[in-house]
Amino acid sequence: MTQAALHQSPGKLYLNLAAILRGRLQAGDWAPGERLPTIAELGQSYGVAAVTVRQAIAILEEEGYLRRQQGSGTFVTEAAGQATRFAVGLDWPALIDMVTKTTPRLLEKRAVTDLPRHAPDDGTAAPAYQYLRRVNALEGRDCLITDAYIDARLYARAPDRFDSETIIPLIEGMGDVTIARCRQVLTIGQANLEDAALLGVPVNTPLGCIRRILTAPDGTILYFNDVAYRGDLVRFQIDLVPKR
């Protein structure tokens, strides 16, 4: 990104710079153990003040990408080349592995009767839902925002657990509840002001947005969830076998 583009991007300058440096670290521009350019060199490269560079580096240090060594400089950690990512689950075990990696924090809850607009073949709405808005952390770092709608009849059976635990395994663990289908739709979005503040990223940062809908055998929507993942943490991989 050019200096002009960096300065013209919306949001806080140090967050934008942190996003650029994070991307370069993930791409391997600096190898684990390598010393980063100095504060002055980075400031000159990106046309920003030293304080902006220090703020960006502090974020990446907190995230585990960098470590500062007094008198020697800032170095790339081994973890920078092994950043944990979410692989979009293409089967049930992969999905469960994906959703159980994080720790949720409840932001808002309320009873509702309507779901967000969705396709007719997604299923039939239950009479009422419990809405939960949460931010989930991965290894101590806020990484996704979730807007979840749980069939109120299920929520009433374990409200404290639904508020604090990963939801899909909780529903699956209810012995008399059958999940007949899980539909996932992945799209690419951008962080608005609220999302950016919650995730600590610049406004308009790419987000991996997944709509996940669980239905019962009779087509009732048991669970409807819109999840926005930090784009730098989502990996989508499908191995295709060419026709022979």
Image (cartoon, grey):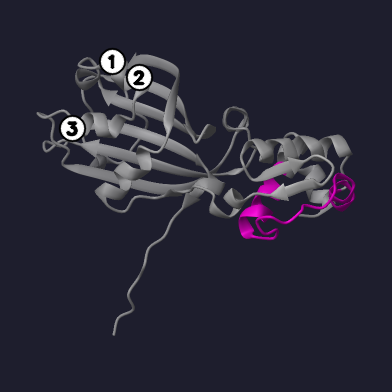
Location of residue 148 by image quarter: top left
Whether residue 108 is visible here, answered yes or no, is yes
Q: Which residues make up the magenta segment?
A: 18-46
Q: Are marks 1 and 2 in contact (CB under 8 Å)?
A: yes
Where 181 sits versus 104, above or below? below
Where 207 sits versus 174, above or below? below
Q: Secondary structure at mark 3?
A: loop
Query: x%, y% of residue 97?
Result: 33, 44
Q: Is residue 82 left or right of residue 126?
A: right
Query: x%, y% of residue 56?
Result: 74, 39
Q: Is residue 23 left or right of residue 55?
A: left
Question: Which corner quadrant holds the C terminus?
Answer: bottom left
Q: Is residue 24 left or right of residue 195?
A: right
Task: Give the residue number, with chain letter if any, for mark 1.
Answer: 159
Q: Secondary structure at mark 2?
A: helix
- Residue at point 73%, 49% (across, down): 75
Q: Main secondary structure of the magenta part?
A: helix
Q: Nearer the viewer, residue 27 or 189?
A: 27
Which mark lies nearer to you, 2 or 3? 2
Task: Give the residue number, with chain letter if any, for mark 2.
Answer: 163
Characterize the local packing of mark 2: few (<14), some (14-19) or many (20 or more) Cα atoms within 10 angstroms.
some
Q: Amino acid at mark 2?
A: Asp
Q: Is residue 22 magenta?
A: yes
Q: Amino acid at mark 1?
A: Pro
Query: x%, y% of residue 146?
Result: 43, 31
Task: Give the residue number, with chain letter if any, for mark 3.
Answer: 220
What numbered label is drawn on residue 224? none
| Alpha carbon distance from label 1 to label 2 | 6 Å
Q: Amino acid at mark 3?
A: Thr
Characterize the local packing of mark 3: few (<14), some (14-19) or many (20 or more) Cα atoms within 10 angstroms.
some
N-terminal of the pair, mark 3 or mark 1, is: 1
- Residue at point 33%, 37% (across, down): 118
